[in-house]
Amino acid sequence: MITKRQYFATVDKGEQEYTIDIVEETSNVFTVSIDGKTSTVDFARMGDNLYSIIIDGRSYDIDITEKGDNFSVLMGGDHFDVEVLDEMKRLMKLRTSAGLEGRQVIEAQMPGMIWKVLVEPEQEVKAGQPLMILVAMKMENEIKAPKDGVVQELFVKPDQTVAAGDKLAVVE
Amino acid sequence: MPDIKKILVANRGEIAIRVFRTCRRLGIKTVAIYTNADRTAPHVRYADEAYCISEADNDTSYLKADKIIEIAKQAGAAIHPGYGFYSENPTFVQRLEEEGIIFIGPSAEHIKLMGSKTGARNAMVEAGVPVVPGTKNAIRDVEEAKKTAREVGYPIMLKAVHGGGGKGMRLVKSEEDFESSFRMASSEAANAFGNGDMYIEKFIIGPHHVEIQVLGDKHGNALHLFERECSIQRRHQKVIEEAPSPFINDATRAKMYDVAVKAVKAIGYYSAGTMEFIVGEDQNFYFLEMNTRLQVEHPITEMITGVDIVTEMIKVAEGKTLTYKQEEIVRNGHAIECRIYAEDPSNNFAPSPGLITVYETPGGPNVRVESGAFAGYEVPLYYDPMIAKVCSFGKTRESAIIAMKRILTEYKVSGIKTSIPFHQRVLKNETFLAGNYDTGFIDSKFDMEDLQRKEQKDPSVALIAAAIKQLLSEKISAQRSVTRRDVGESNWKRFGRLTSLGNRLG
């Protein structure tokens, strides 16, 4: 059975959208077109995140970290964040992105321990104002307000350990 | 003093393994200590004996002096401190002396003397070593400090008397910033080191951080192992070092070696140590501080001299004389070290602890990798982010850079983010390639945004890779979902679902 899919991708949250068509020829070999330019790709998994990829005879060793539809791709010294959506998800994203205005949920960008919480609920804050300090690997990292607003919710307390992606606060 | 038969390394990670390697070569038994966060760490497996010292997962878990001393006594081992933790703690060394445990390092008095920046400064002035203009003694009062800063002349550097690692340090460019900077630095120092005393130094323009590796023994012998240039620093922490320095000239070099050895002799220092200097654009150099321990960057000195610094430390601790005389030490070639941190350079160097899923180390000629990591290792949240240091060697600086570029391409670490892409950028930077960088390199000569900027790069390979990965992920999740729903369903239903899935994917 030949698998065919079409995706829409952006790189590093850029404005340019690429249309990618993929045909799976065998379990390892794919024909991939990006905006009409077609390549033959041999794609083999080497480890949890490591892939060997041969595009028209050129060999690349790449690292891909997957988080939902977002892929962090590391090739040599170059790092790319690629979002890949199918038609349905692309439409859903266009609809929901308008609804998030105003309310900002701040998430931990890394695992760590909350050392200090510098604000209280209902407190007014300015964009860039430190809300709390997260310590990871002996480094202190300020978590700042993304916009002017009021701290609606605080989800963490000092000495609490958090994982990447955990909700820390809401500024509205 | 008897020969040392067994050594406990009061440390973890790559430096514990580094010391153990020399022990193995010398036929000395080894003892590791570990916390439960490090049960699977390689240093535990590398050692002949291993003892858990702490159940607690925090950054003080390797600071259980009572436990370490108890284990060392039971095992009959001398203690090597590595760097960090107890490596420059005079109280700990004093206790070892009282308990009759050999410490492989300098005396408590030397650590204490050089650990106090004002004490060290005064001792160096007495030994004839040039020091940066500034205050001689600790300043607590902000008004007094402001007056002194005016006398020294702006820009000035505020430094914590008991500081290190960039903590409690502030550059002040004008008097109007002085008061707030002083209060912040002093409070930071009080939090980090339990003492908020500060001192003031003249800020040197276009400064280079050049350090001289020294060795001394208990018989009054002292020698230098040439210099290292450590000016590539982020947040006042070294990230790339090289030996020899591409900046200083031979006349400066000779003067610095001379001063460093004289200073070691003047204070009667023994074991390995490093005299750190700041060198201005005009090649004038000033003493910064002395590190009374084995340093992270010691491998590049070992590469250009062939001297095993840990062996010398052990011999000195046994009361023997140094293996070499100064004239027997020959400098050969050029070596570079990159410190690989578990950090995400594309996200403002955010810490990136977690599970290493792929770990492939570089090989081939002119490579040295010191690491405590492996595939399957969970980089703990609680300790320093350095997971490895990779060193390259070449007959010339150019060949050492070429070797390092290759090494970094071969070095694969997956699952966590590392600073490898950052190092690769530095190695392409024209100022770095010209050897013309100072400690302001990252702020002024290195385009940090280049790590984020992608418009000049062709993203097509990344797009292809991500799209194929997405396709495969969808297929896997579709198969899983069919398998899950299979339970309790009839063959007809299963056939229907498979047909529908086939239509969707086909």
Image: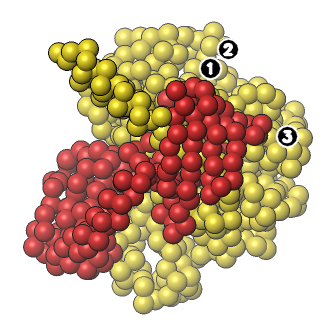
Regarding residue B243, the answer to whether it shows in the image is yes
Whichever of callouts 3 and 2 sits on the residue coming sooner in the sequence is: 2
Q: Evaluate if marks 1 and 3 touch, with contact meaning CB atoms under 8 Å apart.
A: no
In 3D space, how far apart are the residues under numbered discs 1 and 3 (Cα atoms)? 23 Å
Q: Secondary structure at mark 1?
A: helix
Position of A13 compared to B486: left or right? right
Protein chain holding label 1: B
Mark 2 residue crowding within 10 angstroms, few (<14) / some (14–19) / many (20+): few
Q: Amino acid at mark 3?
A: Gly
The lab-note entry on whether marks 3 and 2 share a chain reads yes
Question: Residue at the spot x=42%, y=90% of the render?
Answer: B176
Name the residue nearer the viewer: B17 or A61: A61
In 3D space, how far apart are the residues under numbered discs 3 and 2 (Cα atoms)? 25 Å
What numbered label is drawn on residue A146? Answer: none
Question: Residue at the spot x=48%, y=39% of the render?
Answer: B471
- Colour convention: by chain
What numbered label is drawn on residue B394? Answer: 3
Residue on which the image places disc 2: B25
Q: Amino acid at mark 1?
A: Arg
Mark 1 residue crowding within 10 angstroms, few (<14) / some (14–19) / many (20+): some
Q: Colour of chain B?
A: yellow
Regarding residue B270, the answer to whether it shows in the image is no
Expressed as whole percent of the image width and height from the top left, the position of residue A155 reads: 15, 55
What numbered label is drawn on residue B21? Answer: 1
Question: Residue at the spot x=67%, y=24% of the render?
Answer: B311
Above or below, comparing residue A69 to residue B387 in the picture: below
Position of B356 compared to B313: left or right? left
Q: Which chain is red?
A: A
Whichever of callouts 1 and 3 sits on the residue coming sooner in the sequence is: 1
Expressed as whole percent of the image width and height from the top left, the position of residue A95 reads: 30, 66
Above or below, comparing residue B459 to residue B336 in the picture: below
